[in-house]
Amino acid sequence: MSVDRSLRLKSTLARHRNVLTRAERVANMVEEGSWDESMTGLGLPKFGHRKMKAGKKKKAAPGAEEK
Protein backbone atom coordinates (compact mmCIF):
# COMPACT_ATOMS: atom_id res chain seq x y z
CA MET A 1 0.00 0.00 0.00
CA SER A 2 1.36 3.46 -0.84
CA VAL A 3 1.62 6.45 1.49
CA ASP A 4 -1.02 9.16 1.05
CA ARG A 5 0.23 12.38 -0.57
CA SER A 6 -0.76 14.47 2.45
CA LEU A 7 1.48 12.42 4.75
CA ARG A 8 4.69 12.84 2.78
CA LEU A 9 7.26 15.11 4.41
CA LYS A 10 9.27 15.90 1.29
CA SER A 11 9.24 19.64 0.54
CA THR A 12 6.20 20.42 2.67
CA LEU A 13 7.35 24.00 3.20
CA ALA A 14 8.28 24.49 -0.45
CA ARG A 15 4.74 24.14 -1.75
CA HIS A 16 2.52 27.14 -2.42
CA ARG A 17 0.80 28.75 0.57
CA ASN A 18 -2.18 31.08 0.25
CA VAL A 19 -1.76 32.50 3.74
CA LEU A 20 1.20 34.76 4.50
CA THR A 21 2.76 35.04 7.93
CA ARG A 22 2.71 38.33 9.82
CA ALA A 23 6.40 38.89 9.07
CA GLU A 24 5.81 38.34 5.34
CA ARG A 25 2.90 40.81 5.36
CA VAL A 26 5.02 43.43 7.14
CA ALA A 27 7.82 42.85 4.59
CA ASN A 28 5.32 43.44 1.76
CA MET A 29 4.14 46.67 3.38
CA VAL A 30 7.75 47.86 3.79
CA GLU A 31 8.39 47.21 0.07
CA GLU A 32 5.25 49.16 -0.87
CA GLY A 33 6.13 51.99 1.50
CA SER A 34 2.85 51.72 3.43
CA TRP A 35 4.47 50.56 6.70
CA ASP A 36 4.98 53.13 9.44
CA GLU A 37 7.17 52.35 12.47
CA SER A 38 4.40 53.51 14.81
CA MET A 39 2.06 50.76 13.52
CA THR A 40 1.56 47.53 15.42
CA GLY A 41 1.64 44.04 13.93
CA LEU A 42 -2.04 43.50 14.68
CA GLY A 43 -4.84 44.12 12.20
CA LEU A 44 -2.63 44.12 9.12
CA PRO A 45 -4.30 44.15 5.70
CA LYS A 46 -4.42 40.94 3.73
CA PHE A 47 -2.24 40.46 0.66
CA GLY A 48 -3.04 38.34 -2.36
CA HIS A 49 -0.42 35.65 -2.79
CA ARG A 50 -1.05 33.89 -6.07
CA LYS A 51 1.12 31.26 -7.67
CA MET A 52 2.09 32.24 -11.19
CA LYS A 53 1.90 29.63 -13.89
CA ALA A 54 4.70 29.37 -16.40
CA GLY A 55 3.69 30.31 -19.91
CA LYS A 56 4.18 28.01 -22.84
CA LYS A 57 7.13 28.62 -25.10
CA LYS A 58 6.33 29.71 -28.63
CA LYS A 59 7.54 27.52 -31.44
CA ALA A 60 10.19 28.99 -33.71
CA ALA A 61 9.40 29.71 -37.34
CA PRO A 62 10.20 26.75 -39.64
CA GLY A 63 12.81 28.75 -41.64
CA ALA A 64 14.63 30.04 -38.54
CA GLU A 65 16.28 26.84 -37.39
CA GLU A 66 19.56 27.17 -35.49
CA LYS A 67 22.41 24.73 -35.95
Image: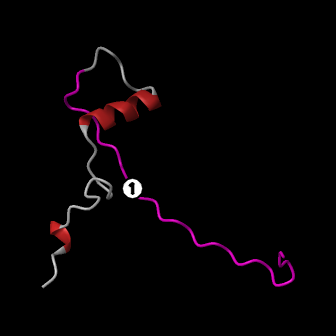
Q: Is residue 63 above or below residue 11?
A: below
Residue most extreme to the front: 1
Please name the predominant secondary structure of the magenta segment in the image: loop
Q: Quadrant of residue 28?
A: top left
Where residue 23 sits in the image (x, y, percent)?
28, 33
What is the span of residues highlighted in magenta in the rendered image?
A: 40-67
Q: Residue at x 26, y 62 (%)?
A: 10
Q: Is residue 52 magenta?
A: yes
Name the foreground residue: 25 vs 13. 13
Residue most extreme to the left: 1
Q: Is residue 53 magenta?
A: yes
Q: Residue at x 37, y 32 (%)?
A: 27
Q: Is residue 6 left or right of residue 35?
A: left
Q: Is residue 33 left or right of residue 4?
A: right
The quarter in which the N terminus is drawn is bottom left
Q: Quadrant of residue 51?
A: bottom left
Residue marked by disc 1: 50
Tag 1: amino acid? Arg
